[in-house]
Image: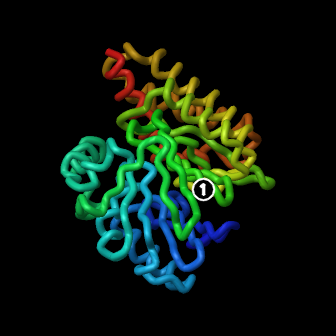
Amino acid sequence: MPQLIDYEHGISAIDSGYYRPMLDAVHLLVEGERAAIVDTGTNYSVPLVLAAMRAKGLRPEQVDYVILTHIHLDHAGGAGLFMREFPNASLTVHPRGARHMADPSRLIAGTVDVYGEAATRRMYGDIVPVPVERIIETPDGASIRLNGRELQFIDTPGHARHHVAIRDTKSGHIFAGDVFGLSYREMDQDGRQFIVPTSSPVQFDPVPYHRSIDLILQLQPEAVYVTHYSQVRDIQAKGAVLHRLVDAHAELGLREKDAGTARPERLREGVKRIVLEEARRWGSKLTDERILDIYSNDVELNAQGLGFWLDRLD
């Protein structure tokens, strides 16, 4: 599987090396002699991204921005280490996430709650703080310029309250992090792309999730870049699927709300059904076993996210 995918408009996807091949993308945006990366993967992504940059003739000094869609560690865990490597870069982050980049202790603790301490260290390494003076907060409506190329920030909660999407005004394309779903390239078929939403812990909320999807659809981009995994097209149709499946996840949660100690397993089995039913509706030729293998981690996280949402409803 390719470690580097080059698209149009100076946009590339670099495999972050997280968990399995082509699960987690770091996006590289190049304008002239200057560059930015969107989401960082983990500390273990640093050598992979630097190698991809060298292959494209880019030096660390040419990176002006490290841009975070949100601060979940598969998106932001490597931010501090990247900032050490990129001496001229500023880090952009939603205002709700800025303090956690400067002091990641609570972010780490929250991740330990989900995965456990040993797994957190194994997956992410030691999280490095970012100096406060190098952080730029990017609320809704903020913008930056990469060598004159304007990047606009859109507040997009639903997956997380500290989530932004980034509209590249040159291409009209959008970097959507996790709020526009999961679309793995192993599922591609006849030039078509499969997509499902992610309700992973701990801030899934269907009402703002729907609003965020609509905000992206209203901008009518030709392409959206999701972290899991990279470019998707036919955006209006995919938005309709995401709306339907966000509702399906919420309905599953409400059905199982009072299932007691059986709730986690019932949620897990329900998410499996949603993924498999959608894959069959979409026309996937892969076996159920292969589909669940591709989405195994996401099934678990979506079920946990629904559990956290239901607890907040109480």
Instruction: Please name whichever residue, 76 or 21, is drawn nearer the observer in this view of the structure.
Output: 76
Left or right? Give the position of 65 relative to 122: right
Image point (29%, 64%), residue name: 80
Left or right? Give the position of 13 relative to 133: right
User: In the orientation shown, which residue stands out farthest toward the front?
Assistant: 148
Total residue callouts: 1
Quadrant of res 40 = bottom left
Image point (33%, 17%), residue name: 260
Q: Secondary structure at mark 1?
A: strand
Camera sees residue 187: no
Up the image or down, 215 lies above or below 314; here it is below
Q: Residues within 10 Å of mark 1 (few under 14, many from 20)?
A: many
> Percent from the top left, x then y, of residue 186?
64, 57
Q: Which residue is mark 1?
A: 168
Amino acid beneath label 1: Asp
> Percent from the top left, x then y, of residue 109?
21, 46
Instruction: Please name whichever residue, 313 or 119, is drawn nearer the observer in this view of the structure.
Output: 313
Quadrant of res 309 = top left
Up the image or down, 59 lies above or below 247; here it is below
> Percent from the top left, x then y, of residue 10?
63, 70
Q: Quadrant of the C terminus?
A: top left
